[in-house]
Amino acid sequence: MAAQPSDTLATLKTESETLKTKLEEERAKLHDVELHQVAEKTEALGQFVMKTRRTLKGHGNKVLCLDWCKDKRRIVSSSQDGKVIVWDAFTTNKILTSSGDGTCALWDVESGQMLQSFHGHAADVLCLDLAPSETGNTFVSGGCDKKSCVWDMRTGQCVQSFETHESDINSVRYYPSGDAFASGSDDATCRLYDLRADREVAIYSKESIIFGASSVDFSLSGRLLFGGYNDYTINVWDVLKGTRVSILFGHENRVSTLRVSPDGTAFCSGSWDHTLRIWA
């Protein structure tokens, strides 16, 4: 007698759970030490002070995205007002995009042709970040399925995935060495994932933080993690110790994006208050 579809589905679910358990067991074998144990001998950070150095006004609506140019001075930003403002000059030949259709895509800007598509998310893909150029052809993405994926740009395949957040992942950013990445989520936490150990190694949160993290970026050394939040603040975390070292006030609405300058001397934040702020 042929197996019923329901029996086949139950068998596949059982096999899936068994494989997932085996995967977790293999990951556990790499779990030899906690990050806070490694950081015990590291000197604590001193007083951390930053303030707004310049406010860039020009957008007529919510600032949604920004990035620094490689000349270490210029910034490009986009807004819900339909404008992209280049505060100087910005050029590129290829661009990676994430989409509400659950995919990412690599495009040739000049021809407008799609070079590669990436399928693996089960819901809107909200963010992505390219690995540092010296570490290889990979990028990381995060989405509404609470999952972050690491992709091989050459094959289009997902090579690693992590599902420890409890809500949408709004931002992902590679650690400067390319061996790890951070994520910010609507669950009010930022998290650090070690790609070599294939697991989450730190959670950056406080009971008093109840609003989602919309954007994250590392300092040039990787010791600090900057997180922009929906309560208009920017929290600065000690990556190794897992403690908050500063909280920055200034924006008058949700902090939707932030980026550290290429030389590490400043960072820029964009907000729904229609402004960008440069901090140093």
Image (cartoon, helix red, strand yellow):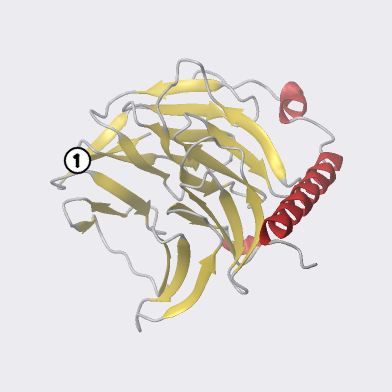
If the image is split into quadrants, where does the C terminus sit?
A: top left
Q: Position of residue 112 (x, y in %)?
A: 35, 80
Q: Residue at x 42, y 74 (%)?
A: 107
Q: Residue furthest top?
A: 208
Q: Position of residue 137 (x, y in %)?
A: 61, 67
Q: Residue at x 61, y 43 (%)?
A: 163
| Res 219 visible | no
User: What amino acid does circle 1 point to?
Assistant: His
Q: Residue under label 1, please give it.
A: 274
Q: Residues within 10 Å of mark 1 (few under 14, many from 20)?
A: many
Viewer-closest of 41 and 16: 16
* Above-or-below relation of 245 to 152: above
Which structural element holds mark 1? loop
* Above-or-below relation of 273 to 152: above
| Res 104 visible | yes
Location of residue 8 by image quarter: bottom right
Marker count (numbered):
1
Viewer-closest of 275 and 198: 198
Q: Position of residue 79 (x, y in %)?
A: 23, 51
Q: Position of residue 75 (x, y in %)?
A: 31, 53
Viewer-closest of 183 and 236: 183
Q: Residue at x 16, y 52 (%)?
A: 81
If the image is split into quadrants, where does the N terminus sit?
A: bottom right
Does residue 89 appear to the left or right of 39 in the view shown? left
Q: Residue at x 16, y 45 (%)?
A: 61
* Above-or-below relation of 257 to 240: below
Q: Residue furthest bottom?
A: 111
Does residue 242 appear to the left or right of 208 in the view shown? right
